[in-house]
Image (cartoon, rainbow, N blue to C red):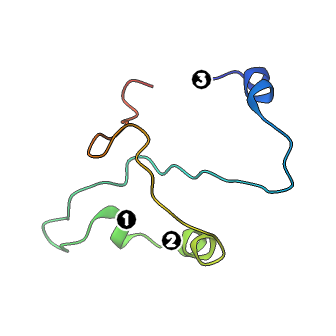
Amino acid sequence: MIEFEHIKKLSRPSPSKIVLLVIDGVGGLPHPKTGKTELESARKSNLDKVAQESLCGLIDPVSPGITPGSTPA
């Protein structure tokens, strides 16, 4: 885990705010009975609200097709 003091040194003052939301562990496979993944079955009204009021996008933090899993973290 990165120490907060290190994060403070990396940050820069800005009039805008950025929130990077990383949702780990939702890439599940469809359930055999429902045909839906955990994320598709979940109630996610808060995530829907954040998405509606935000600019959303996707990035490739490592390289296209390579996912940075949380296992090494």
Secondary structure at badge 1 equals helix
Locate the C terminus by quadrant.
top left
Q: Which residue is mark 1?
A: 39
Secondary structure at badge 3 equals loop
Quadrant, the N terminus: top right
Quadrant in the rendering for residue 37: bottom left
Please name which of the two marks, 3 or 1, marks the residue nearer to the observer: 3
**What label sits on residue 21 in the rendered view?**
none
For the residue pair 9 and 39, the one nearer the viewer reads as: 9
* Within-10-Å neighbours for mark 3: few <14, some 14–19, many 20+: few
User: Residue 1 got which mark?
Assistant: 3
Q: What residue is shown at x 20% (from left), y 74% (from top)?
A: 34
**Quick check: 43 above or below 24?**
below
Left or right of 13? Residue 1 is left
Q: Nearer the viewer, residue 63 or 48?
A: 63
Residues at discs 3 and 1 in contact (Cβ within 8 Å):
no
The tag earlier along the polypeptide, 3 or 2, is 3
Q: Position of residue 28 (x, y in %)?
A: 27, 55
Identified at 77% across, 34% down, the residue is 11
- Residue 30 lies, in percent from the top left, at 20, 64
Above or below, 26 against 49 in this view is above
Distance from the alpha carbon under mark 1 to that under mark 2: 8 Å
- Depth order, front residue of 38/4: 4
Residue lying farthest left? 32
Residue displayed at 47% across by 73% down: 43
Q: What amino acid is found at the position of numbered circle 2 in the picture?
A: Lys
Mark 1 and mark 2 residues within 8 Å of each other at the beta carbon? yes
Residue 47 position within the rendered picture, expressed as x and y whole percent measured from the top left: 56, 68
Q: Which residue is mark 2?
A: 44
